[in-house]
Image (tube, rainbow, N blue to C red):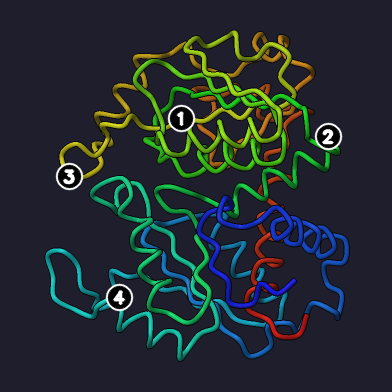
Amino acid sequence: MDLFGKDFICTQEWSLDELEAVLELAARMKRERYSPRWTSLLEYKTFLMFFYNPSVRTRQSFETAATELGGHAQFLEPSAMRLKTATTAGETVEDAAQVMSRYGHGLGIRILEDKIGYYGEGDELLREYARWGSIPVISMAHDKFHPCQGLADLMGLRARLGDVRGKKALLTWGSGALARSWCSVQEFLLVSSRFGMNVTMAYPEGYDLDPAVIAQTQANCAANGMTFEVVHDSRSGYDGADVVYARNWVTPQAYAGGLLDKKGEIEKAFQHPGWITDAERMRKTNNALFTHPMPVDRGHEVTDEIASGPNSIIYDVAENRLHVQKALMALTMSDKL
């Protein structure tokens, strides 16, 4: 399958066969982590990384991936570059993308939360770089989607559950002191529904996600003969769940003033203190796995007992980011596969 040069901005834009190719290669790379068959796939090649937002796992996993493939990952902070913005003069996306395409072999961009002024701005930026550049653009998390996280989630679920088709996935909102974007939870909705899971969303009134993503999730479930359900209480969604994904996210009004109202969103979140994944709720499940993209807001989104318990796969999923990203970089950047 030829994926060389293909952008990876949202999993929904790739066919199931293409996604399966990534997952299959990621599993092989995980089993044979330092095999010589992988260690020169990106020899002398550079993966450029634009970090508008800081990270823990994202930078570490992409840099490690590039190193283990024999290449190099270059960390770039846009704030230290002379780029044009809405308020400053500088280099246009067209010029920057075309020049970077002469230097590197892939471009990762991470932009979300307080680095955008409205929902969708980050997605627009990635697609503008993809439009003008001639190297693959990979989302390292932006305001709409987090495709690498979505595949890492699926890889983790399959390792413990086998075929996930027909299993019940609960995505539940959690209270917390972090005003989180929609990217990870929206990607989870798309991936879980695309691969044949029954999906339940639980969140307080007023925490709706992107209507287009919800419509696509419904369509994915319908195409697979599965169910999609939305509930607005903090308990009923756990009934019979095989997977629980608990995470805080902001309201649709988060950017009403032209920038993220982080303080206001945190204050709103603490008006819903009962929204926490704990042992009592997990007992209602089908001995469910617990997952989360991290960082985990322990004591608000989930209790320590569950986050560190035997059914938690949060560290497995975090590790899978490395292997998924290695596979993606190899498939989209290497001419040696």
Residue at horizontal 47 percent and vertical 82 percent from the top = 134
Question: Would residue 115 appear left or right of 257 to someone viewing this image?
Answer: right
Ranked by sequence position, the earlier of labels 3 and 4 is 4
Mark 4 packing: few (<14 Cα in 10 Å), some, or many (20+)? many
Residue 317 position within the rendered picture, expressed as x and y whole percent measured from the top left: 69, 45
Give the quarter of the image for residue 168: top right
Which residue is labeled 1 in the image? 248
Mark 2 packing: few (<14 Cα in 10 Å), some, or many (20+)? some
Q: Which amino acid is tagged 4?
A: Val
Mark 3 packing: few (<14 Cα in 10 Å), some, or many (20+)? few
Which residue is labeled 4 in the image? 93
Ranked by sequence position, the earlier of labels 1 and 2 is 2
Between disc 3 and disc 4, the foreground one is: 4
Mark 1 packing: few (<14 Cα in 10 Å), some, or many (20+)? many
Can you say which quadrant of the picture contains the C terminus? bottom right
Between disc 4 and disc 1, the foreground one is: 4
Residue at horizontal 70 percent and vertical 56 percent from the top = 19
Which residue is labeled 3 in the image? 258
Question: Would residue 10 appear left or right of 35 to someone viewing this image?
Answer: left
Q: Which amino acid is tagged 1?
A: Asn
Q: Which amino acid is tagged 3?
A: Gly
Which residue is labeled 2 in the image? 161
Ranked by sequence position, the earlier of labels 4 and 1 is 4
Ranked by sequence position, the earlier of labels 2 and 3 is 2
Residue 242 position within the rendered picture, expressed as x and y whole percent measured from the top left: 75, 24
Ranked by sequence position, the earlier of labels 4 and 2 is 4
Report the front residue among 175 and 157: 157
Residue 323, labelled with which disc?
A: none
Residue at horizontal 29 percent and vertical 74 percent from the top = 80
Distance (Cα) linking label 4 and label 2: 43 Å
